Structure formats: C-alpha cells, structure tokens
Image (cartoon, rainbow, N blue to C red):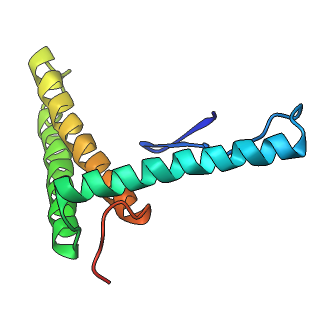
Amino acid sequence: MSVTRTSNVRRTSDHFEPEAGLDPQAQRRLRGHIEQIDYTAYASNREVIGQVLGQADMARFQKLAVAAALARGQWIAAALAMTEAAQPLSPGEAARLAGLRAAYEELTEAYEGLRRLVERGYLSFPG
C-alpha cells in the first residue's frame, strides 16, 4: 500500500490490485470477497458514525472551520509576539508554541475527517 503525504493530509492508495499469478476466475472471486469486505466496513462506518455524530450540516462545518482558523491565528500571533525581541525562544515559549500548533493541526485534521465522512457517505448531509 502506497502512502502520499500532501501538506498535512495523508492519503493511501487502497484499491484492489490482483496478483499477477492468479487466473482470471480466482481474481474475480477475490475481487468479490474484497467488495463484500469493503461494503461491510462501509455499512458499519455509516451506522456507528451516524449514531455517534448524528447529521452533518453547514453550521457544524462552520464551527469547526472557525475553531481551526482561530487556533491558527493564535499560533501565528504567539510566534510573532515571541519573536518581537529578536531573541531565541526559551524552552517554555517553544513548548507553548508547539502546543498552539498542535491544537491548530488537530482541529484541521478533525475538519478534514468530517469532510471525508460526508464524502464517503458515512455521515448524511442535508442537500
């Protein structure tokens, strides 16, 4: 399985690729099993995630996007404030900055995760 890292989003290529040594009938059988497995995972995700999160709507996306934007702004504002004195960061300042960045990155990942849930059909979105 190959992994592509773009920005801070990790994507994996998980499409079925039959082994070259399998005969066509065995490949079709294996593909059928893989499709059943994929559907089982889809149905499970749709049911469980729907129960846990309910329904996605524009207001929920906006709240998450605003939270991520605020976290990003706080991280960058803190970095700018810490570098005003043109001195190296203290260990405490570096730790605070790392915490602010981690908060921003977690919120960004959550936003992307919510978007993927809708995109994959695990979470309903009123259209």
Position of the N terminus by quadrant: top right
Q: Please name the residue shown 16% across and 31% down the image.
A: 99
In the image, is residue 101 above or below residue 74? above
The residue lying at 29 percent from left, 74 percent from top is: 125
Say which quarter of the image contains residue 104: top left
Q: Residue furthest bottom?
A: 127
Give percent across and percent down for residue 102.
Answer: 22, 35
Residue 103, by quadrant, is top left
Work out whether residue 100 can be spotted.
yes
User: Which is more toward the observer, 37 or 81?
Assistant: 37
Q: Is residue 54 left or right of residue 32?
A: left
Residue 56, image x and y in percent? Answer: 23, 68
Depth order, front residue of 58/107: 58
Farthest top residue? 91
Residue 115, given in percent of the width and then of the height, sits at: 35, 61
Q: Quadrant of residue 64?
A: bottom left
- Looking at the rendered image, the quarter that the C terminus falls into is bottom left
Left or right: where does residue 78 sit relative to residue 111?
A: left
Counting from the top left corner in percent of width and height, residue 37 is at 54, 45
Above or below, 70 against 34 in this view is: below
Q: Is residue 92 above or below residue 27?
A: above
